[in-house]
Image (cartoon, rainbow, N blue to C red):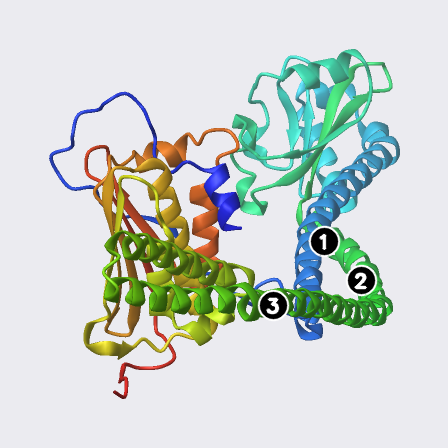
Amino acid sequence: MSEDLEETQPLRVADAPRPVPTAPPAWIALGEPTDPEQGRRPVAGRRIAVQLLAGIVIALVTVTIGGSAAARRLAEREAVNDSAAMANLLAETVVQPALTDDLLAGDPEAQRQFDTLVRDRVMGERVVRIKIWGSDGTVLYADQAELIGQVFTLDARQRDVLATPRTVAEVSDLDRAENVFDHDVGDKLVEVYRPVWTSTGQVALFEIYTPYDLVSERTGQLWRGFAGVTISTLLLFVVLLTPLIWHLAARARRDQRHREQLLERAVDASENERRRIAASLHDGPVQDLAATSFVIAGATARAEASGRADLAGELHGAAQSVRTSIRSLRTLLVDIYPPSLGRAGLSVALSDLAQSERTPGLEVRIEPLAQAVDLGLDPEQERLVYRVAQETLRNAAKHATPCVLRISLSRRSDDVVLDVVDDGPGFDVARTLAEPERGHLGLQLLAELASTGGATLQVASAPGHGTRWRLRIAGSAAGSREVPS
């Protein structure tokens, strides 16, 4: 993976020279710790039950709100239709037979007789107001005597009803002038009007008002019937669906366990193969080179003893080359089989990594761990430290030379901190993150490497200020301990 990072993301931006910032670059967090168990947790039956219950509650609330609105609209429609039918019945059987020309002419005796008839046979719980209008807007009769004789402007619908006979019913808000005395019976009434005629053919407008309370009563009736059917249907649906969901959840858990077992077998097989290759490499070429190094060292000593300085110099160079090759092979062993890092030790592995880098112009310095403190890192955390150090070193070798690179590893309170600092040309972190070159994913991959390992990765860099990398592993399991001498 380290080679892929090196190939896919140049971490230095080779642009034209830019002005050197006056302030040192600030730290920018590339990766934060993530939950390593996320996505591997089995499907929980209790969680599914809670989600199902929440869905049912949301469905009930939605049905309640929508059902209430629909029931009210339907109740209003039924109340309006009932009022219209009642107005037609009263007009045909009571009002129109008693309607006379004298009443339309304003005769007081005719008004008194008509008022007696209306109060005996029309007014009641279902009819709270009644008016008879002339075509010019004059109130010819009203159950409220104050309105008789007053003139109001008929609206367009009322005039249209007189011109084209029909019955109109609607919910009235009582905001017109002629309704000034009607607020004592409610803020809303159902208003119905239609034309009526005298025996001689004179036309008048018959108007009644019925209580809006009938709408609320009918709404309750409709809602109770609607809610009963809906809720019982939802509960039956839940009863039928629960065993199916439980079965699917159990099957999903079995499938997940099966996939995990297959993955573990694949990982074990890969690890066994890598272990075999690493063992063969260690027991073969590494040991042979180590033996060769000892042989050359002995030959060098004998050449020096016999006064053959030129031969001793050549042998010394060969021995140095062999030792470098051994360090490179040990670094390769860590790449092939990371658990071998634990046997070699993190400090030795970092030292081998630094000495195996032979890029011209790059000087690598490893700062020793102060007071030989045991960092208390587990094998996974040690491999994470090694991988981050390896990737930042390789990117510095590719993009920051000539420079001096320092690698330090220390404990700060409960945290273990890896710092990789170079004095190279630096790069614009914000621009690289905002406008990454196509196919270049090194920053993102380094961030994911740290995040999945439960660590925080930060970078601070700017053109002319070098680059600082910091990997922080918080709350190590083991505390600081003195290493026995």
x and y percent of residue 112 in the render? Answer: 68, 34
Q: Nearer the viewer, mark 1 or mark 2?
A: 2
Q: Nearer the viewer, residue 395 or 106?
A: 395
Q: Nearer the viewer, residue 467 or 338?
A: 338
Of all residues shown, which one is farthest toward the left?
A: 22
Relative to residue 95, is residue 146 drawn left or right? left
Dot 1 falls on a residue whose secondary structure is helix
Q: Nearer the viewer, residue 66 or 448?
A: 448
Q: Quadrant of the C terminus?
A: bottom left
Q: What numbered label is drawn on residue 143?
A: none
**Upstream in sequence: badge 3 or badge 1:** 1
Q: Which residue is mark 2?
A: 234
Q: Is residue 484 visible?
A: yes
Q: What numbered label is drawn on residue 280?
A: 3
Q: What numbered label is drawn on residue 63?
A: 1
Q: Nearer the viewer, mark 3 or mark 1?
A: 3
**Upstream in sequence: badge 3 or badge 2:** 2
Q: CA distance from mark 3 to mark 2?
A: 67 Å
